[in-house]
Amino acid sequence: KQWYQRRVAITAGIGKDYEPLFGLKAEAAMMRKLPTIRISFRLPEESNSTMYLLEVASPTGIVFTKSLVEGQLQLTDGGFSAITRYDIKEGGQRLHLYVDPATKLKEIEFNIPMDTKFEVTNRMPVQVSLIDYYNPSKRQTI
């Protein structure tokens, strides 16, 4: 039972004396009149991982687009320099960013702009997860 409770705390990133595994944070923002998700996290100093997966869902009525993601990938001075590849899934509703753990950046922060397809009155918060690709038990979801 204790093992299960600890695993739930790690997965959910909650707990009384528990610091989230990657310090994953996400917030809504606007950038050049586009809805944007601002994401930050830190990679472990010591890790055997060869890849991390950042999985981001988009809010209802908003999608990730190839042109906006590739525009951010062109930036060489920010967190996107740690991204080795990306996939847009489910018609733009989900974005997978593959993070290279060998990056010199340990504190990673970047903005992901999106495109509005239609207006929604009360948008629900979206799920963002950072997962050790080859050891999925090491993950944080917010």
Image (cartoon, rainbow, N blue to C red):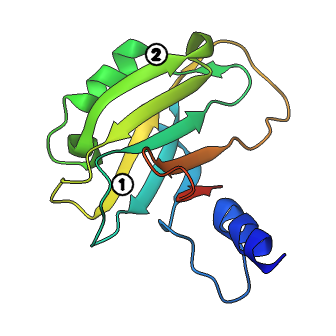
Rendered location of residue 77, percent (x, y): 15, 47
Q: Is residue 58 above or below residue 47?
A: above
Point out which mark residue 36 bears: none
Q: Residue at x 27, y 72 (%)?
A: 45
Q: Are the two marked residues, 1 and 2, in contact with CB atoms closer than 8 angstroms? A: no
> Left or right: 18 with respect to 98?
right
Kindly indicate the quadrant of the structure image that contains residue 12: bottom right
Element on which disc 1 rests: strand
* Type of the residue with mark 2: Thr
Rendered location of residue 13, percent (x, y): 65, 67
Q: Which residue is mark 1?
A: 109
> Would residue 33 be visible to someone looking at this image?
no
Q: Residue at x 55, y 56 (%)?
A: 139
> Left or right: 14 with respect to 115?
right
Q: Residue at x 67, y 60 (%)?
A: 11
Q: Is residue 87 above or below residue 135?
A: above
Kindly indicate the quadrant of the structure image that contains residue 69: top left
> Would residue 87 be visible to someone looking at this image?
yes
Q: Is residue 49 above or below residue 19?
A: above
* Type of the residue with mark 1: Glu
Q: Residues within 10 Å of mark 1 (few under 14, many from 20)?
A: some
Rendered location of residue 87, percent (x, y): 43, 21
Rendered location of residue 72, percent (x, y): 29, 31
Q: Is residue 70 above or below residue 83?
A: above
Element on which disc 2 rests: loop
Classify the position of the N terminus by image quarter: bottom right
Q: Which residue is mark 2?
A: 65
Judging depth in this view, the residue of 132 and 80 nearest the camera is 132
- The mark total stands at 2
